[in-house]
Image (tube, helix red, strand yellow):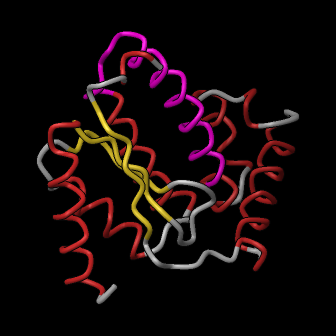
């Protein structure tokens, strides 16, 4: 989108952790989401808002609820994130990226220690507006929204800090 042109860089950081989505973890998450939707009485979680999810919580297993909570929250963050971008509010958009990662880590549970480390290291860097895991999780990469003026220093600092912490 145009508001991002020139102001920020999108930087992808590879954790070095190979994600094997075929191993079943991602399919398990999908099953929990489908189960939650069935229990709530909708075709997909796109049709569920926060209040409806809260009203259905007692009927859901804890894991189904956690997965649904993440998906419902992600749907809201996408809508709000689009609004923030249209308004040119990159700081707020970055906060939605951080919130998304925290929800992935705490509720969807598709993060891993290396992705969490990358996001926490990024959060401490000057000019980083937001960061989150990207793709299906369980390894892979993070996406980072960084003020263009800080992009080079961000990449150098992140490479050094990640190598120091992980040996990668």
Q: Residue furthest top?
A: 87
Q: Which of the two residues, 129 or 112, is positioned nearer the viewer here?
A: 129
Residue 72 on the magenta segment: yes
Looking at the image, how many numbered discs can be counted on the residues?
0
Residue 93 screen position, x and y as percent: 36, 29
Residue 4 image-quadrant placement:
top left
In the image, residue 166 sits, relative to residue 65, either above or below, namely below
Q: Which of the two residues, 113 or 148, is positioned nearer the viewer here?
A: 148
Q: Residue furthest bottom?
A: 167
> Which quarter of the image is occupied by the C terminus?
bottom left
Residue 105 screen position, x and y as percent: 46, 61
In the image, residue 51 sits, relative to residue 16, either above or below, namely above
Residue 7 image-quadrant placement:
top left
Residue 23 on the magenta segment: no
Q: Which of the two residues, 2 or 100, is positioned nearer the viewer here?
A: 2
- Looking at the magenta stretch, what is its main secondary structure? helix
Name the residue at 79% across, 38% down.
40
Q: Residue furthest left?
A: 126
The boundaries of the magenta stretch are: 67-92
Name the residue at 38% across, 42% down.
10
Q: Which of the two residues, 16 or 113, is positioned nearer the viewer here?
A: 16
Name the residue at 60% across, 32% down.
75
Residue 31 image-quadrant placement:
bottom right
Residue 167 screen position, x and y as percent: 29, 89
Residue 65 screen position, x and y as percent: 64, 52
Name the residue at 32% across, 65% down.
118
Q: Locate residue 70 relative to residue 121 in the image: left or right.
A: right
Q: Locate residue 42 relative to residue 146 in the image: left or right.
A: right
Q: Locate residue 45 relative to residue 99 in the image: left or right.
A: right
């Amino acid at each position: 989108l145009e508001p991002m042109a020139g102001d920020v860089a999108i930087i992808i950081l590879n954790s070095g952790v190979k994600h094997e989505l075929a191993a079943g973890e991602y399919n398990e998450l999908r099953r929990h989401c489908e189960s939650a939707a069935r229990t709530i009485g909708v075709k997909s979680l796109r049709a569920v808002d926060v209040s409806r999810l809260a009203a259905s919580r007692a009927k859901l297993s804890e894991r189904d609820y956690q997965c649904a909570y993440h998906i419902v929250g992600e749907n809201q963050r996408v809508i709000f994130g689009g609004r923030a971008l249209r308004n040119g509010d990159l700081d707020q958009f970055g906060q939605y990226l951080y919130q998304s990662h925290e929800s992935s880590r705490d509720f969807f549970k598709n993060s891993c220690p290396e992705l969490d480390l990358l996001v926490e290291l990024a959060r401490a860097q000057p000019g980083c507006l937001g960061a989150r895991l990207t793709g299906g999780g369980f390894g892979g990469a993070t996406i980072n929204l960084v003020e263009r003026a800080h992009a080079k220093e961000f990449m150098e600092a992140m490479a050094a800090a990640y190598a120091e912490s992980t040996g990668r």
